[in-house]
Amino acid sequence: RMVKRNTVTAAAAAAAKYCQPGMAIPHDPLRGCRQYPAVSGVALAIPVITRGLQAVAGELHRKLGSVFTVSFLGMIKVTFLVGPELQGDFFSRLDSEVCQGETYKMTVPVFGRGVLFDVDQATRTEQIAICFEALKPARLRSNVETMVREVEEYFSRWGEQGTVDLKSELNLVILMVASRILLGKEVRETMFDEFASLFGELKDNSMHLVSHYSPTLPISRHRRRNAASAGLKALFARAIELRRASGRAEDDALQRLLESRYRDGRPVSDNEVTGMLVALLSAGHVTSSNTSTWTGAFLLSSPRHLAAAVDEQRRLAARPVDHAALSAEMDTLHRCIKEALRLQPPVPLLLRSVRRGFAVRTREGKEYEVPRGHGLACYIAFNHRLGRVYRDPGEYDPDRFGPERKEDKAAGKFAFTAFGGGRHACLGEAYAFLQIKAIWSHLLRNFELELVSPFPEVEVNNMMPGPGGKVMVSYKRRKLN
Ligand code: HEM
């Protein structure tokens, strides 16, 4: 039953000064609108700065329940849906009801014109399907050997012992893997340094909050972002020319994109291919790099789980690190990575806009209407720490995903959403796990590691916050047997 916003009770009317028109209105026939589900975003600014977004969200959740609206000067209203049971409304509704497009407009100057969030919904859906086809797990099988070789070569440069900033090391090795598997040998072998410098510039200048709210504001950061994006696309266009001139077909994502066609038979243009490559790198690099670093920080701070992960590698030491080993035989390592993703999801907050209003029902049976025009928020980092879903939610405890506990499954489909879910679920999940496991299985097999700097704090003012500062790790070579 749809709850009409204009049919609130007398009690609700009395509370109207708090429940501004257009807000999600709790429908509680017995108590009326006693809760005040709308809060001012401006009033929240100081608490968010001083106490952090998670703490403030916790307080709002305690006071207002699982559905509440934050209003920014009455102009932007964002409704938060808290808890796995409400995430179907966020992830699975039709794009005509709950739409991604508005909130990803900031990617247009990054990916370039004619790609993804610069095109209509139908074309975007086709382009995403083309990217999915290029990275689907069956396709990646043949790339694993190259991926593992790239990782081995990278760490062969480390000495017998030393101290490194793990964050910058993992950032670089992941970029090398991506340049080989996604972009191909031309970029990896002849243009890597130029590519790495342009991509670094793009990454540093495109993910700040100011770009989210005003992507074309003429500021120096945006000029540098635009130049880096144009430079990257030109570099990929050169790689395409080299590929065509060689007359060879390679086994990488570039080749698969070049050979793709839209459903009507139209080939994907070079501009679209270069834009999709920038999109895949942007979606996949920071997320994988941050997750690898958090995995290291957590493991190296948790002797019991580190020992379990090392034991697993010892058991598998006689086996080659191939696709079967990485995808099916490293359960302990998989859970260690997944737990890092639960505690530090690289995309902590997802936003949508509501195109057609709809009603949601909480687990307590309360109904709310979320009206057209609202923003909709899925605060992944907060949902991942709900005590009713995860036992001791602040603890790093990979065993919670084991067969005895399965805490992510027990609470329903959307209890673990580090990779999103439903209609727009991440298409790089298999690729991300393969490469992070390739890296960490190699590190655990070949090095004794120790975290020698304090456990990292989370970065602020970044849409994809990672571990802040340097993450210093000392290493000593070893061989597991
Ligand atoms: C640990 C690594 C990763 C994490 C945590 C992650 C997370 C996510 C999340 C949360 C979404 C959903 C966004 C939304 O619903 O608005 C998403 C979508 C996406 N991801 Fe990933 N991602 C990772 C790695 C990758 C990689 C390696 C690639 C590609 C190489 C990739 C490509 C994409 C793409 C293209 C989408 C958009 C899908 C769509 O809109 O239908 N991701 N990712």
Image (cartoon, rainbow, N blue to C red):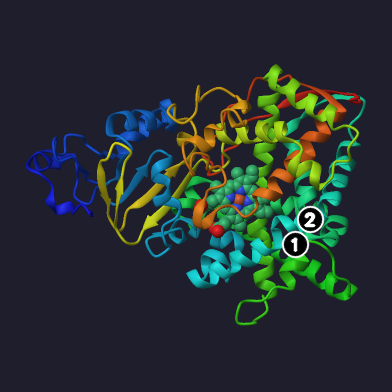
Who's the residue at 50% across and 24% down the image?
391
How far across and down, in percent of the image, does residue 212 sit?
Answer: 48, 51
Which residue is outermost to the front? 404
| Type of amino acid under label 2 | Ile
Q: Quick check: is the Cβ at mark 2 less than 8 Å away from ligand 1? A: no
Q: Is residue 475 above or below residue 128?
A: above
What's the mark number on residue 181? Answer: 2
Q: Which residue is mark 1?
A: 253
How far across and down, in percent of the image, does residue 213 sit?
Answer: 44, 52
How far across and down, in percent of the image, does residue 59 sit?
Answer: 34, 28
How far across and down, in percent of the image, does residue 418 sit?
Answer: 56, 42
| Type of amino acid under label 1 | Ala
Q: Quick check: is the Cβ at mark 1 less than 8 Å away from ligand 1? A: yes
Who's the residue at 79% across and 24% down the image?
311
Who's the residue at 36% across and 35% down the image?
45
- Report the front residue among 131 and 270: 131
Task: Say whether disc 2 or disc 1 marks the residue closer to the N-terminus.
Answer: 2
